C-alpha cells in the first residue's frame, strides 16, 4: 500500500509543479524564444503547455497503475463478508419495502 501512495504523491506533486513552472518560465522570460512572442500568444502557449503537462502526468500515472500486478492486492476476507451481508440486507429490505408500497397502492 505504501508503494501506491508513494506513486500517487509523486504524480500529484508533478501535477502541481510542472504547470506552475511552465507558467512561471513563460511569464518571466526564462524559456528561450518566449521574448519574441506577443503577450496574447505568450498566455495562450503557456496555458496550453501547462494543460498538456498535467495530462502527460496523468497518462504516466495511469500507465504505472496498469503495469502493477492485479494479484498483488487482495481484499480483506472479513471486509468482503461484511459488504456482502450489507448488500443482502439492503436488497431484502428493498423488496419488502416494495411489497409494502404495492400493498399501500392497492
Image (cartoon, grey):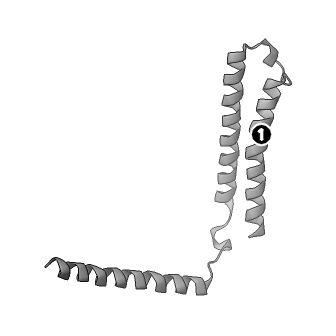
Is 67 in front, or is 93?
A: 93
Query: What residue sits right under mark 1 in the picture?
Result: 18
- Residue reaching furthest to the right: 30
Residue at the image point whose x is 75% and y is 63% from the top: 5
Left or right of 79? Residue 46 is: right
Position of 43 relative to 102 (above/below):
above
Where residue 47 appears, as percent x and y from the top left, is 68, 29
Left or right of 54? Residue 13 is: right
Where residue 55 appears, as percent x and y from the top left, is 65, 41
Q: Could you say whether the residue bearing mark 1 is in a helix, strand or loop?
A: helix
| Quadrant occupied by the C terminus | bottom left
Tally the marks: 1
Residue at the image point whose x is 40% and y is 81% from the top: 90
Q: Residues within 10 Å of mark 1 (few under 14, many from 20)?
A: some
Residue at the image point whose x is 63% and y is 68% from the top: 70
Left or right of 104? Residue 52 is: right
Is 7 in front, or is 64?
A: 7
- Quadrant of the rendered structure where residue 16 is? top right
Where residue 88 appears, as percent x and y from the top left, is 42, 84
Where residue 45 appears, as percent x and y from the top left, is 69, 24
| Quadrant occupied by the N terminus | bottom right
- Residue reaching furthest to the front: 104
Position of 81 relative to 19 (above/below):
below
Position of 66 relative to 56 (above/below):
below
Is 54 in front, or is 63?
A: 54
Amino acid at each position: 500500500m505504501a508503494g501506491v501512495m508513494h506513486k500517487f504523491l509523486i504524480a500529484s506533486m508533478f501535477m502541481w509543479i510542472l504547470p506552475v513552472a511552465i507558467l512561471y518560465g513563460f511569464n518571466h522570460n526564462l524559456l528561450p524564444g518566449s521574448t519574441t512572442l506577443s503577450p496574447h500568444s505568450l498566455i495562450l502557449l503557456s496555458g496550453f503547455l501547462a494543460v498538456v503537462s498535467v495530462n502527460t502526468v496523468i497518462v504516466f500515472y495511469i500507465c504505472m497503475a496498469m503495469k502493477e500486478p492485479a494479484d498483488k492486492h487482495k481484499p480483506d476476507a472479513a471486509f468482503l463478508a461484511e459488504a456482502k451481508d450489507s448488500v443482502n440486507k439492503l436488497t431484502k429490505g428493498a423488496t419488502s419495502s416494495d411489497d409494502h408500497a404495492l400493498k399501500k397502492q392497492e
